[in-house]
Image: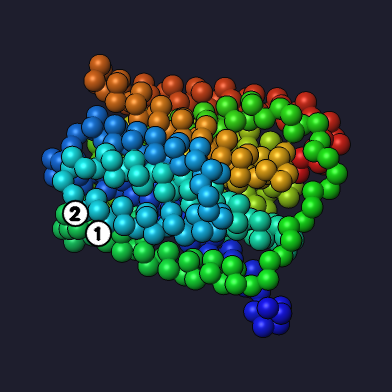
Amino acid sequence: MARSEVPAVPLALVAVAGLMSLAVAMGIGRFAFTPVLPLALGEGLLDVAQAGWIAAANYLGYLVGAVTAARVPLRPSALAATGLLATAALTAAMGWSAGTLWLPLRFLAGVASAWVFVATSVWCLGVLSSRNATAASGWVYAGVGIGIVLAGALCLVAAAAGARSASIWLQLGGLALLLAGPVVWVIARLSASPATPPAAPAGAPHAAAAGTAGLVACYGVMGFGYILPATFLPVLARSVVDDPLAFGLAWPVFGATAALSTWLGARGLRAATRLRTWAVCQLAMGLGVLLPALWANVWTIMVSAVLVGATFMVITLAGVQEMRARAPGRASRGVGRITAAFALGQMAGPAVSSLLLHTTAHGLALALGSGALALLGTGAWLLAAASRMTVAQEVLNG
């Protein structure tokens, strides 16, 4: 079919579709459990230790999804659409099922969300790159924070109105389906429009491409360190204030700073290398994780929400771009590696916290402290690695 008969999808629609895709997969599929958790605890459906194992099941699913995404015999765009629809169904099923089914449902939701994240990072960023619009990637990854805000705001309003957790899960499933619809439409339009060949990489991969093991490890530590406040911030907030409006604000604040940070981070990456940006954010996140471990009050919890929320998506943006740059032509595999490392870190976080909670009353504080130390240590390593790069490598490495 001639190009004039099927017009190309506007870049703005592509970026918004990527944003909405990540909002569903991550903001709802991955993280909706966090704002619902205080309500489920209040209803006596589970305790904090059980919540840790349910969260770990979701992270195990995320690992399985990250490892299998490049092996599923579907195009990245089709895999994303499949994962989005599965996320909506699995989220709604949480409201229909008894608590005994929550663990397998959250496992499957983790698989679906990883498929969507990896696939969207490939198809959406691929389209943007082919049209020389990589600066719009900040809008795409802002979808994670926007999804967190939407899920958190829905839970906040519903809880204030007296809704039960089962009803909230059904509402979240409906929201996921509502957001997934336009994404599937854009994906269908892209499949029907003439393909734009991706820009060929300029020259051979530079020398830094060989040393990715350390970066993968640092990304995994980020998953371990950040997931503890990402899972338990509302619970920590509820421990110091019992007003649902007050403790419910912790999660939307987290998401809003995550969304804003990606827009600012995309601009900042034009002025600083990806490794330097990553290092600074890893150090700041370590401080944010440490604060509520030392002093649990409203202010430290809110500062933690800002520091962790403002850095984890910038690290994601820098990490994904770094792996794509170091493995041209093999983006799915590179993104899959760091996503798998991230998932391993996320699995370790709730598992460690659950074990510590069973052994000591200060288990959560100890888990937060260990995560903070790991983040600060790897942040220092990244900063040293960035400092060792030559000027030529910094130019090539972005």
Mark 1–mark 2 distance (CA, rounded to whole Å):
8 Å
Q: Secondary structure at mark 1?
A: helix
For the rendered model, the colour scheme is rainbow
In the picture provided, is 263 more to the left or to the right than 29? right
For the image, the number of numbered tags is: 2
Q: Amino acid at mark 2?
A: Trp
Question: What percent of the width, then of the height, locates residue 208?
Answer: 77, 31
CB contact under 8 Å: marks 1 and 2: yes
* Residue drawn at (64%, 25%) of the image: 214
* Residue drawn at (18%, 49%) of the image: 97
**Residue reaching furthest top?**
359
In the picture provided, is 201 more to the left or to the right than 195? right
* Residue drawn at (74%, 33%) of the image: 209
> Alpha-carbon neighbours of circle 1 within 10 Å: few (<14), some, or many (≥20)?
many
In the image, residue 35 above or below residue 351: below
Does the image show residue 249?
Answer: no
Q: Which residue is mark 1?
A: 170
Q: Secondary structure at mark 2?
A: helix
Q: Which residue is mark 2?
A: 96
Quadrant in which the C terminus appears:
top right
Sequence-earlier tag: 1 or 2: 2
Label at residue 396: none
Q: Amino acid at mark 1?
A: Leu
Question: What percent of the width, then of the height, locates residue 232?
Answer: 33, 37
User: Camera-side residue: 344 or 259?
Assistant: 344
Does the image show residue 360?
Answer: yes
> Alpha-carbon neighbours of circle 2 within 10 Å: few (<14), some, or many (≥20)?
some
Q: Nearer the viewer, mark 1 or mark 2?
A: 2
Question: What percent of the width, then of the height, locates residue 296?
Answer: 33, 32
**Residue reaching furthest left?**
44
